[in-house]
Amino acid sequence: MTKQERKFPNTRMRRNRMQKFSRKLTSENALSANDIIWPVFIKEGKAIKQVIDAMPDVFCFSIDSLIKELENPIRLGLNAIALFPNIDSKLKDREGSQGIDPNNLICRAIKEIKNEFPSLGIICDVALDPFTDHGHDGVVRGGIVDNDLTLDKLNKQALIYAEAGCDIIAPSDMMDGRVGSIRNCLEKNNFKNTMIMSYAAKYSSSYYGPFRSAIGSEELIKPKDKKSYQLDFANSDEAMHEILIDINEGADMVMIKPGMPYLDIVSRAKETFNMPTFVYQVSGEYSMIMSAVEKGLANKRDIIFESMVCFKRAGADGIFTYFAPYLLNDLKKGI
């Protein structure tokens, strides 16, 4: 057979991939600063920027230090942060009383941050685990997390956060009925415009370890796990049921947590409900990526951006990630 007679494919998929400009032209998904939410840890004190051992380059800030730290990310396009408290163990109790104290660390942080950066969106996690001495998200009675007793606490917690100026209430406790209960509470108290982003599909996962260490809730007292209220990682239909319930109860946005191991849930949720859908790249995912980077097994920039675009490809509208400051810097450079 001569060269002239040789048959070649009419369609060569590689053609569009051969040059950088054409890869950009044909890219189906893109990441921007608008997609990024920064989860931050805060604690009492002044001028504190405390290293979190299990999470390289992640810190726990005092409120004043966080305000200084926010200046550059906001300049680079950061739109929203999510606040998580690490409170003194002496303030923790069986009922999570600090969680409903209107002068608690989170409420004061909201007010001070809003005073400095009025347009920055503030998302507040609603659950009792940072405030309980047993580490659970709700009230424990007889070794069981009591769903209905917990709802009353969550309503009060959501309300004090809204009163302090929180923009988005994010219940992460996974109690049945909590979205509807919080929605009713907010409406009755004239916070009808306060948004609810439900942790609608929060799995009982092994990927939360570094986070629990960061907020000081790693030791669980009976029950020894959260499987009675967080989702079974074997289930996806159950997740869709949970999400549907929360939408019907008044959630404005939904979240899937963890992220990378649950991309199928993100994709299915977006396709099924066509709701604003968020994903949380949790502490264990962050620490594994950083471990690979530190050991020279992965290029930092490449692996972080790949993980972000995977979330976008799956259908996520926004991503909670501890890589936010790093990503915003690179996105500003146009890399």
Image (spheres, rainbow, N blue to C red):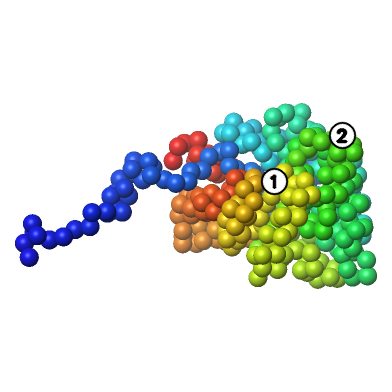
Q: Position of residue 149 (x, y in %)?
A: 92, 58
- Reading the chain from its start, which is encountered first: label 1 or label 2? 2
Query: Where residue 97 sits in the image (x, y, percent)?
Result: 92, 51
Is residue 132 placed above or below 102 in the rendered structure? below
- Residue located at (58% from left, 34% from top): 77
Of helix, strand and loop, which one carries label 2?
loop
Q: Residue 243: give x, y in percent of width and height.
A: 71, 55
Q: Amino acid at mark 1?
A: Met
101 is higher (above) or lower (below) than 146: above
Which residue is denoted by mark 1 in the rendering? 253
Task: Give the total number of marks visible in the rendering.
Answer: 2
Position of residue 144 in the picture relative to residue 302 (left or right) = right
Determine which of the numbered discs, if any, sits on residue 190 in the image: 2
The N terminus sits in image quarter: bottom left
Q: Residues within 10 Å of mark 2 (few under 14, many from 20)?
A: few
Residue at x 78% of width, y 58% of height: 174
The image quadrant of residue 206 is bottom right
In the image, 61 versus 184, the foreground residue is: 184
Q: Is residue 143 above or below residue 29?
A: below
The span from disc 1 to disc 2 (Cα, nearest Å) is 20 Å
